[in-house]
Every structure is written in C-alpha cells, then in structure tokens.
Image (cartoon, rainbow, N blue to C red):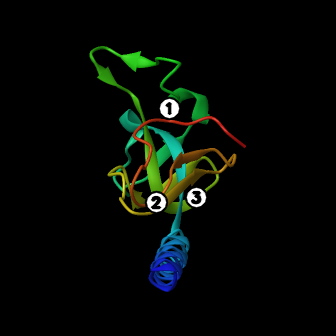
C-alpha cells in the first residue's frame, strides 16, 4: 500500500510540472503598441492626431458631447503627431502596451478590459 501511494504522489507531481510548464509557455504573447488618438481628427489618408495617453485613461473623462472623442489606436506607424496603418479595434490574445510603458491589456485569459496603471 505504501508503494502505490508513492507512485500516485509521483504521478501527481509529474502532471503538475507538465501543467506548469505548459502554462508558462503560453505567456509568450505578441506585443502590440498603442497610442491615444483624437477620433475626430481622422484625415483622408486614414491618419489620426496622437494626444497624451491621459485622455484615454478611464479615470479622466474627456468627451465631446455624448460620444467619447479619444480612443486607443493599436499598432500603427507614427510620424510626428500623426499615426496611421493601425486600428481602433482592440486586438485579443496580445499584450498591449502604450508608448509610455503602461500595460493596457495582457494577452490570453484574464486580459484587462480597461486602461491600467503601471510602469
């Protein structure tokens, strides 16, 4: 009876190590940059004006009328105060970080739905 207990505990230990290794490997997500933009500044070339990321902070409300005027713009190529070739649609299963280093969303399960503070 003692030998079967040792084998069972060893089996549980091996399975636990495999599970931990698998979960650790899953934390390797693609990183996507984000900039806060004025959504009312869309130009014909598809570019937006980049504003301070505090405008996209959920703790600070900056609105024009009933619709929010500022949004995160994911990916994209920045040229001066303008950005283009990205999207305002939040990608999933990626880690999103602002240019200031604020983590907006962590990849995979448990991703943040709002703006986060951290550096």
SS type, badge 2: loop
Residue in the picture at 63% in, 44% down:
102
Q: Is residue 33 above or below residue 7?
A: above
The residue under label 2 is: 107
Residue located 49% across and 70% down the image: 23
Q: Nearer the viewer, residue 100 or 25?
A: 25
Residue 15, x across and y down, in percent: 46, 79
Name which of mark 3 and mark 2 comes first in the sequence: 3
Q: Which mark is residue 78?
A: 3
Q: Which mark is residue 56?
A: 1
Mark 1 element type: helix
* Mark 1 neighbour density, 10 Å: few (under 14) some (14–19) many (20 or more): many
Q: CA distance from mark 1 to mark 2?
A: 20 Å
Q: Judge whether 100 appears above or below 53 on screen.
A: below
The answer to whether 41 appears left or right of 118 in the picture is left
- The answer to whether the residues at label 3 and label 2 have Cβ atoms under 8 Å apart is no
Q: Nearer the viewer, residue 40 or 88?
A: 88
* Camera-side mark, 1 or 3: 1
Residue 80 position, x and y percent, is 64, 52
């Amino acid at each position: 009876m003692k030998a079967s207990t040792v084998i069972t505990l060893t089996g549980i230990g091996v399975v636990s190590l495999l599970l931990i290794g698998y979960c650790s490997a899953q934390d390797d997500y693609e990183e996507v940059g984000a900039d806060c933009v004025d959504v009312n500044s869309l130009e014909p070339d598809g570019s937006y004006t980049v504003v301070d990321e505090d405008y996209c902070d959920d703790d600070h409300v900056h609105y024009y009328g009933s619709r929010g005027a500022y949004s995160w713009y994911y990916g994209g190529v920045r040229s001066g105060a303008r950005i283009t070739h990205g999207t305002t649609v939040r990608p999933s299963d990626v880690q999103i970080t602002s240019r200031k280093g604020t983590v907006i969303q962590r990849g995979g399960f448990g991703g943040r739905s709002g703006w986060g503070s951290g550096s």
